[in-house]
Amino acid sequence: MGKRTIQDLADARLAAEYRQPVKTLEQAVEAIGWALEDRPKCCGEEVEISSFIGSAYQAVCRTCGKFIFDVTGPEFNGRAICLPDQDKYDLDHEARWVSGQEIRE
Ligand SMILES: [Zn+2]
């Protein structure tokens, strides 16, 4: 049986309302109107970037909730850190980002 795709991984990790085709970093940033730069700005301030062993996997605007997220990045479950299983998923692709805006009630 073949490996599952990054799209499968994205769909497994995202709630239904955030599901979308996976994108390159450039496409993901563009889709929410950010500039592709080291520290993008949104709502007049630098976005909050989270990284893991030197690579950024998530950026969020604290004000409006726009975000980009690397679906192959780590997942934090309490004190455990889970990374996607390389044996199960074919992870070696540029299109591994999603973006959007947090839905706040
Ligand atoms: Zn914003």
Image: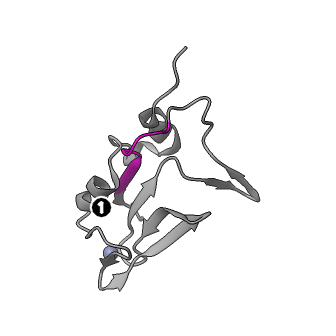
Q: Chief secondary structure of the magenta span?
A: loop
13 vs 4, nearest the viewer: 4
Which coloring applies here? one colour
- Evaluate whether residue 5 shows in this view: yes
Q: Residue furthest top?
A: 1
- Pinpoint residue 51: horizontal percent, then vertical percent: 55, 66
Please tell me whether mark 1 sits on a helix, a strand or a loop: helix
**Picture quarter with the N terminus:** top right
Q: How many marks?
A: 1
- Evaluate whether residue 102 shows in this view: no
Q: Which residues are magenta?
A: 91-99
The reply, left or right, for residue 84 in relation to residue 99 is right
Residue 17 against residue 49 in the figure, above or below: above
The residue pinned by badge 1 equals 29
The reply, left or right, for residue 49 in relation to residue 31 is right
Q: Amino acid at mark 1?
A: Val
Which residue is found at the position 42% from the left and 42% from the top? 16
Residue 54 against residue 85 in the figure, above or below: below
- Pinpoint residue 11: horizontal percent, then vertical percent: 45, 38
The reply, left or right, for residue 84 in relation to residue 92 is right
- The answer to whether residue 38 is magenta is no
- The answer to whether residue 97 is magenta is yes
Which residue is found at the position 33% from the left and 75% from the top? 40
- Pinpoint residue 75: horizontal percent, then vertical percent: 62, 52
- Pinpoint residue 12: horizontal percent, then vertical percent: 51, 37
Q: Residue furthest right?
A: 79
The image quarter containing residue 93 is top left
Neighbour class for label 1 at 10 Å: few (<14), some, many (≥20)? many
Residue 65 against residue 91 in the figure, above or below: below
Q: Quadrant of ligand 1?
A: bottom left
**Picture quarter with the C terminus:** bottom left
Which residue is found at the position 50% from the left and 32% from the top? 90
